[in-house]
Image (cartoon, grey):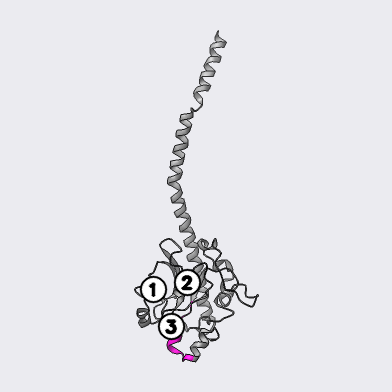
Amino acid sequence: MRNTAALSGRRAAKGRAGFTLIELLVVIAIIAILASMLLPSLAKAKQAGQRMSCLDNLRQLGLANSMYAQDNAGFFPPRLATNRWPQALYPAYKNVALLLCPVDAMFHPQSAGDPDTNHIADNSPRTYMINGFNDYFYATLDSGSFQTFMNGAWLQGLPESKIQFPSDTIILGEKLPTSDQYYMDLLEISGDMGNDITELNQMTHTSGSDYAFADNSARLVRAGQDLWPQNLWALSAAARAKYAKQL
C-alpha cells in the first residue's frame, strides 16, 4: 500500500512539473513579443555603430588629406585622371578598408579604376568622393587652363589657405554605390550646376549622410543640408550662396 501510494505521488509530482500545451504557447507568444520589441532597438544600435565607423573612416581620410598638404607646401592633392586622391593619400592612411562605409559595403560601391594596377587604392571599392573645388579653379584659371584642370592634367591642387570656412567646408562625402566618381565637381565648364550633385548619396544613414570637413572634423549632415541654404561644397561666401541648391 505504502509503495503504491508513494509511486502514485511521484507520478502526480512528475505530471505537475511539466508544461501544458497552452502554457507552452503562452511562453512562445511572450518570447515573440519581446523579440519584436528588442529587434528594432538592436537594429538601431547596429546602424549607430555603422555610422560611427563611417565617421571614423572619414575623419581618418580627412586627416590624411591635411597631412598631404603639410608635406606638399600647403596644397591638397591635385585633381588627376590617374594617381587620384585615394592613391595620393594612401601613404597616410594605409588601409583601403577605410574607403568603405560599413552600410555601403554590401552594395559593392564602384571605383572607375586606374590604368596603373599598382594603384591599389584607386582600384579599390569606394564609398567616398572628394571635393574637386572646381568653383575655385573656374574663378582663378583662364578657360584653357580650366579645361586642362577638368581633363585631370592640372598638376597643382587647392591651396589649403584658400578655405575660408573650414568647419563648414566639405572635403569628403558619400557617393551613390553605382557612381564611379572620384571628385565632386560643383561646376561644369559653363559655370552652371554640375551633374556630380546627382552622384551624392544624401541618405546613407536614414536621415542623412556623413561628411569630412576642412577642420578635420566629421559629422552627419541631414539630407540636402550640404547644398541648402549654403552650399558646403563651395569655397567662397559668394559661391556658397550662388550655388545653393534645394533638392
Q: Secondary structure at mark 2?
A: helix
Mark 3 crowd level (few <14, some 14–19, many ≥20, 10 Å Cα): many
- Expressed as whole percent of the image width and height from the top left, the position of residue 54 reads 49, 64
Of the numbered discs 2 and 1, the one sitting upstream in the chain is 2
* Label disc, if present, on residue 79 of the rendered structure: none
Residue type at mark 3: give it: Asp
Q: Does 223 sit above or below residue 230?
A: above
Q: Nearer the viewer, residue 195 or 73?
A: 195
The residue tagged 2 is: 199
The residue tagged 1 is: 227
- Expressed as whole percent of the image width and height from the top left, the position of residue 44 reads 44, 54
Residue type at mark 2: give it: Glu
Q: Does 47 sit above or below residue 169?
A: above
- How far apart are labels 2 and 1 at the CA level? 13 Å
- How far apart are labels 1 and 3 at the CA level? 14 Å
State which quarter of the image contains the C terminus. Answer: bottom left
Residue type at mark 1: give it: Leu
Q: Secondary structure at mark 3?
A: helix
Q: Marks 2 and 3: which is nearer the front? A: 2
The residue tagged 3 is: 135
Please state the extent of the stretch shown in magenta in the rendering. Answer: 131-143
Q: Nearer the viewer, residue 75 or 78?
A: 78
Magenta stretch containing residue 172, yes or no?
Answer: no
Q: Secondary structure at mark 1?
A: loop
- Expressed as whole percent of the image width and height from the top left, the position of residue 142 reads 46, 92
Residue at image x 47%, y 57%?
47
Magenta stretch containing residue 137, yes or no?
Answer: yes
